[in-house]
Amino acid sequence: MMSFQMAVGVYDDHRSADAALGAFLSSSFDLSQLSVVGKEHHHDLYADAYCRSADRTLYSGKFGTFWVAGPLTAAVIHGLDSTTLSAELNALGVGLFMQGVPLEAAVEYEAAVRDDKYLLVVHGVEVDVDSAAAVMVPGAAKVRMHTGNVSIPPA
């Protein structure tokens, strides 16, 4: 197990999240450390369904439909299979919780996505996450840092 950092930025709208993504794209930041979470704007009649590709997932369940792209995808998919799903958390919250985000914050992030906000989540070592958080702050409604312990495969 290795200690890692996570910065979660909450963005009020697509434009501000897109501006932050643009800032990351024009920097030398390793985009493989960045996840994006947003709400799907059409409603399916199907519950607890998901489709996925290599690095993206679209999930539809009791809390609505949302998509995830980036390294957080694997944790969300694991959250779908987890017995930790509860009245408080959906797969997104479980995935965040399993990555070291405190329960209260995971519930808050789920609520933000339900309320049409966007999340940018950066995973990595402290120095990378600190610099990423500096990129996130200007357009974000909120940026929080979290520390967790996960198995990180060697580069």
Image: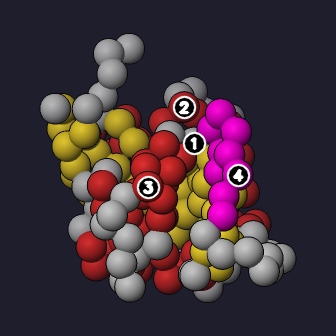
Whole-percent x, y for residue 100 in the image: 25, 55
Residue denoted by label 1: 70
Which of the two discs, 1 and 4, labels the residue nearer the N terminus?
A: 4
Measured in 3D between alpha carbons, the distance from the residue under mark 1 to the one under mark 3, in whole angstroms, is 19 Å
- CA separation in Å, label 1 and label 4: 15 Å
Q: Which residues are magenta?
A: 49-57
Q: Nearer the viewer, mark 2 or mark 4?
A: 4
> Going from the N terminus, do you reach mark 4 or mark 3 first?
4
Whichever of callouts 2 and 1 sits on the residue coming sooner in the sequence is 2
Q: Residues within 10 Å of mark 2 (few under 14, many from 20)?
A: few
CB-based contact (under 8 Å), mark 3 and mark 2: no
Question: Which residue is denoted by mark 3 in the rendering?
Answer: 81
Q: Considering the numbered disc 3 on the image, is that residue within a helix, a strand or a loop?
A: helix
Of marks 3 and 2, the one in the foreground: 3
**Residue 47, quarter of the rendered image:** bottom right
**Dot 1 and dot 4 residues touching (CB under 8 Å):** no
Please identify the dominant SS of the magenta region: strand
Type of amino acid under label 2: Ser
Q: Is residue 143 magenta?
A: no
Of the numbered discs 2 and 4, the one sitting upstream in the chain is 2
Q: Check if mark 2's residue and mark 4's residue have beta carbons within 8 Å.
A: no
